[in-house]
Amino acid sequence: MEARYRMEENPDPNGSSGKKLLHPRLIPYKTYSIRELMRYGKDRSTFSEADISGALKLITDLVAENLRGGNNVEIEGLGFFSVSLKSRPVMDKKELRSESVHFKNVNFR
């Protein structure tokens, strides 16, 4: 894989001003829209853009429904989707009520 990247400083949790560790961050060549991918897909298969659009809409709906239901979703060959949560910091789990736990993000690995 040919990739362009730049080196960026890691955030310092202690706030010290000393030398910081670096990590690589990808510089993408382009961001493809779903419309572009559907057009490419149509040219590489017997499916029409409408067929691809309908299938993507169905998959999107099913992934979202399952994530809302507390499940993880694997799309073979692509990766795993999961949900992360957030709450205020507590020392004991009995200090937290379910109303204080909120959706944070959809993760992709």
Image (cartoon, rainbow, N blue to C red):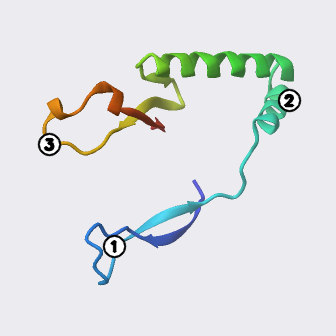
* Residue 31 drawn at (x, y percent): 71, 50
* Element type at mark 1: loop
At x 29%, y 66%, the residue is 13
Q: Amino acid at mark 2?
A: Asp
Q: Is residue 78 left or right of residue 31?
A: left
> Which numbered mark, 3 or 1, is in the foreground of this view?
3
CA gap, disc 3 and disc 1: 30 Å
Q: Is residue 37 left or right of residue 106?
A: right
Eyeballing the image, is 90 above or below 54?
below
Q: Is residue 78 left or right of residue 10?
A: right
* Residue 96 drawn at (x, y percent): 23, 32
At x 18%, y 34%, the residue is 95
* Element type at mark 3: loop
Give residue 100's quadrant in the image.
top left
CA gap, disc 2 and disc 1: 45 Å
Give residue 33's quadrant in the image.
top right
* Element type at mark 2: helix
Which residue lies under the disc numbered 2?
Answer: 43
Q: Is residue 21 left or right of residue 67?
A: left
Which residue lies under the disc numbered 1?
Answer: 21
Q: Amino acid at mark 1?
A: Leu
CA gap, disc 2 and disc 3: 56 Å
Number of other residues with Cα within 10 Å of mark 2, as a class: few under 14, some 14 to 19, many 20 or more: few
Q: Amino acid at mark 3?
A: Met
Q: Are marks 3 and 1 in contact (CB under 8 Å)?
A: no
Which residue lies under the disc numbered 3?
Answer: 91
